[in-house]
Image (cartoon, rainbow, N blue to C red):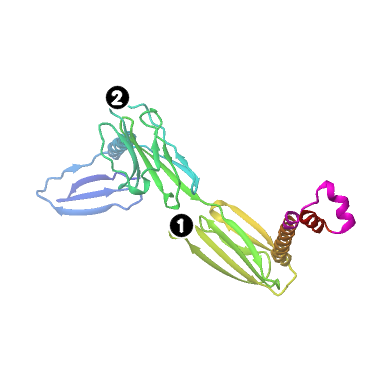
Amino acid sequence: MRVCPAFQVTARGGAARLVGYSAGAVPVKTSTPAASNTSTAISPHPAGLLEVCGQNMHTRGVLGIMGLVWILLASSLLPVNMQATVRAVVGGDVLLPCSCPHPPPDEHYLVWQIGQHTNVNYAIAKTRTENISPQFLNRTRLFYPADPGNCSLHLQRVRVSDGKTYSCHYNNPKITNVTVSLEVTAPYSLQCSTNSTGELYQCTASGGFPEGRVYWLQAGQAVEKYTQDHLTGLYNITSILRTTNHSSTVQCVLENPPLQHNITITCSPEGVKAPRVSEELKASLAVGSVLLILAAVFLIVLFTAWKPCPSSKVSSAIEGGTCGSRLNESQSG
């Protein structure tokens, strides 16, 4: 808080003295040569000086309040920036929300952008020029102006690269800005396998986003490897655990902190024997099927080659031998 000083000017004995008073300070005296021997005294009353100082401080306070009001009024004329966060899954569709007032006829204005140079989609009155970024061609749809008041953006076939901050600009009648942040995710596929001795385990998490972490609920030496697909942006994580307890059951855990979601899978040495048994069973079924097919073919050939005797000569065939030989003799006689 500023304190207004009080001054007293006196002239005594041919010298003028200027005495300055301030709160908490000792008076400071200065002297100048006198112009004449006439003694002159100018001594304003301290109370009057304090009154003038108070008026100045009151004026400054009023000006400060007026300045604050002006700043608030000016800020109300700037574009409004409202924020929202939306989450989407890779390959799916998502709606980026943006509500806007009904536009005047032939004066609608809507632009969706990323930053200042990437145009996602737009609808501007009396504008036919197509200037949409290539990565969003044929993947976005607007409801505006056919649906007045709905400036939302429908984004299809979401990609990892779509995870950015989008801006919705519309006239209200001034240009208003709505910011929407898109968070892209993709679920991991978790698999676990082990070798025949049960001392080496491998846990694989594939096709997920954002980047997660794999760890084991078992003591041992683990080695992790992270790779990312350059085309899709999805992550593949492989972790190999080596343990000396051959008969133990271990658990592989996939942790995804951004999603606050964990996936746990159990790995056991017995689990690796099942595929070998199933392969043996498949081989046995294949051999059995071949044998059944051969037996069926043999029976069909046998039935086709064997011809029964006519009813009139069944008895003679039984008495004299084979049906074929009797038939041949009767035909020759």
Location of mark 2 (residue): 105
The quadrant in which residue 324 appears is bottom right
Q: Position of residue 39 (x, y in %)?
A: 15, 45
Seen at 25% across and 31% down, the residue is: 126
The amino acid beneath tag 1 is Gly
- Crowding at dot 1, Cα within 10 Å, few <14 / some 14-19 / many 20+, comes out as some
Residue 235 included in the magenta stretch of the image: no
| Sequence order check, earlier mark of 2 and 1 | 2
Which image quadrant: the C terminus?
A: bottom right
Q: Position of residue 3 (x, y in %)?
A: 32, 45
Tell me the number on the disc at residue 233: 1
| Distance (Cα) linking label 2 and label 1 | 44 Å
Q: Tally the numbered discs.
A: 2
- The correct choice, above or below, for 9 with respect to 77 in the image is below
Residue farthest bottom in this picture? 244
Q: Position of residue 2 (x, y in %)?
A: 32, 45
- Which region shows up in magenta? 301-321
Q: Nearer the viewer, residue 27 or 35?
A: 27
Q: Secondary structure at mark 2?
A: loop
> Would you say the magenta stretch is mainly helix, strand or loop?
helix
Q: Secondary structure at mark 1?
A: loop
